[in-house]
Image (cartoon, rainbow, N blue to C red):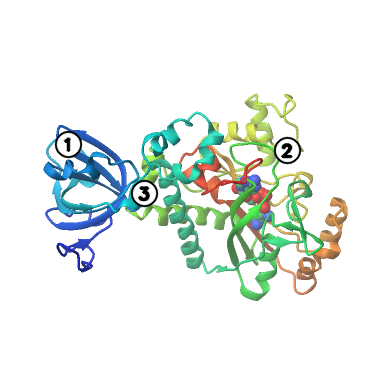
Amino acid sequence: DKSLPAPVKIKLDDTDSSKITLGDGKDVKGTRVRVFGRVHRERKQSKVLFITLRDGYGYMQVVLTGKLAETYDALTLTRETSMEIFGELRQVPEGAHAPNNRELHADFYKIPQIWKAAGGDDAITNRVSQNTDNQAQLLDLRHLTLRGETASKVLIVRDAVEFAFNQVYKEMRLRKVSPPALVQTQVEGGSTLFEFNYYNEKAYLTQSSQLYLETCLPAMGDVYCIEKSFRAEKSLTRRHLAEYTHVEAELDYINFEDLLNHLEEVMCRVLEVTMSDPTIKQHIMDLNPNFQTPSRPFMRMKYSDAITWLNEHNIPNEEGKPHEFGDDIAEAAERRMTDEINRPIFLTHFPAHIKAFYMLKDPNDPRVTESVDCLMPNVGEIVGGSMRMDDNEELMAAFAREGIDPSTYYWYTDQRKYGSSPHGGYGLGLERYLAWLCNQHTVRDCCLYPRYFGRCKP
Ligand code: 4AD
């Protein structure tokens, strides 16, 4: 069959057959194949053993009949056991359901002793099901819960999204760099710095690669990175991790409008590329059946208008009072507004004092900055970005206001000394983007092994 990959000829003890992964040649029927996988589910119906096999590329229903269903291995088969199976792919009978509408009628299989998964009290189903109402214990078992359908789909979508960012940035001629994780400067405020002893010098885990990206502009043009960022967040929320994957980009010789347009383009194009793979699209639709590609242009709303909107909708600030210009819009209020509006929002022009020191002031209103947060329904902020202060004196004044010693930032301020330029950029939290795309309640379910306040294992 043409849709099958070229057969891999391996000399077997009994026969030759082509090895396929479980998602291969979805329409293939009537061919004898050889597959490997783990027992995802099994059920016995009269004398027939039905196994759903899983290999990370798909699921396949396998049917064992007659003597094959009565061997010692078949009678003691446990979930997660690895198997090698030969058989013919057939259409499922009328009215029956199976992945890709087909099943493998086995004529031979092998289960080496060490491939068998634990059974009894130690069976995976017992270990996981005893703990389903305890989030902490489930996370202790993350190495096993990863095998579940939802967790594995989210991580497979994550791989596709990360790949799409790389593709889209290449299309847009941004160059990838890899800034250091061990640093001696802060970007987003001292309160969330992870400090450590670096050969007897004070150092931190990076909060953002932004400042380093800025230094690349004169050398390489527009740049991006996909690296870990670290925040010593001291609260437990749905959207805060201590270690997260940060997609950051920096663009040279642009204005604020260019930045917003670029951001919209990247976010939509990444979706397009991600969805162009039918398997990934299906995973997204399984996880988030109501997902709709956002329409462009995204809604644009100034911070000051958001304050008015919140008051008109009786959404109070953290003290229970009406919002005032200058208030930091708290997570709960932000989410209520985003959910109510129910489409992506570019929230812009935040007051200078509630934002980071490096943000450029709006020339038309120096109270506010040329800054943007992109808010998504169900998650809230997934992107933070801004134009950067390009005047050295202004930057020095900002350092002084924040009480930051500028001498350790000499490599950053030198950018203003040796050919400054209007530039800006942003950071997107990959786990938050995925929480939105895959409709996950928390960012913890959008990374492999989440790290947050109180958790640094497994
Ligand atoms: O708004 P933030 O703090 O902006 C920066 O770090 C800029 N220096 C980025 C830049 O301009 N290059 O963070 C950017 C994004 C947030 O919108 C959010 O999606 C994510 O990073 N983020 C977190 N994600 C998970 N856990 C946390 N503790 C996060 N903190 C920020």
Mark positioned earlier in the residue sequence (2 or 3) = 3
Contact check, label 1 and label 3, Cβ < 8 Å: no
Front-lying residue, 389 or 140: 140
Foreground mark, 2 or 3, reads 3
Q: Which residue position holds label 2?
A: 328
Residue 402: x percent and y percent? 84, 51
Badge 1 crowding class, 10 Å Cα cut-off, few under 14, some 14 to 19, many 20 or more, is few
| Kind of element beneath mark 1 | loop
Q: Which residue position holds label 3?
A: 281
Foreground mark, 1 or 3, reads 1
Going by the numbered disc 1, the residue's amino acid type is: Ala
Tell me if I can see residue 98 in this picture.
no
Look at the picture and state if 147 lies above or below 398: above
Q: Give left or right: position of 426 versus 172.
A: right
Cα gap from disc 1 to disc 3, whole angstroms:
24 Å
Tell me if I can see residue 169 in this picture.
yes
Residue 86: x percent and y percent? 18, 55
Front-lying residue, 412 or 130: 130
Q: Residue at x 76, y 44 (%)?
A: 354
Q: Residue at x 56, y 47 (%)?
A: 458
Residue 267: x percent and y percent? 50, 53
Contact check, label 2 and label 3, Cβ < 8 Å: no
Residue 125: x percent and y percent? 39, 36
Badge 3 crowding class, 10 Å Cα cut-off, few under 14, some 14 to 19, many 20 or more, is some
Going by the numbered disc 3, the residue's amino acid type is: Lys
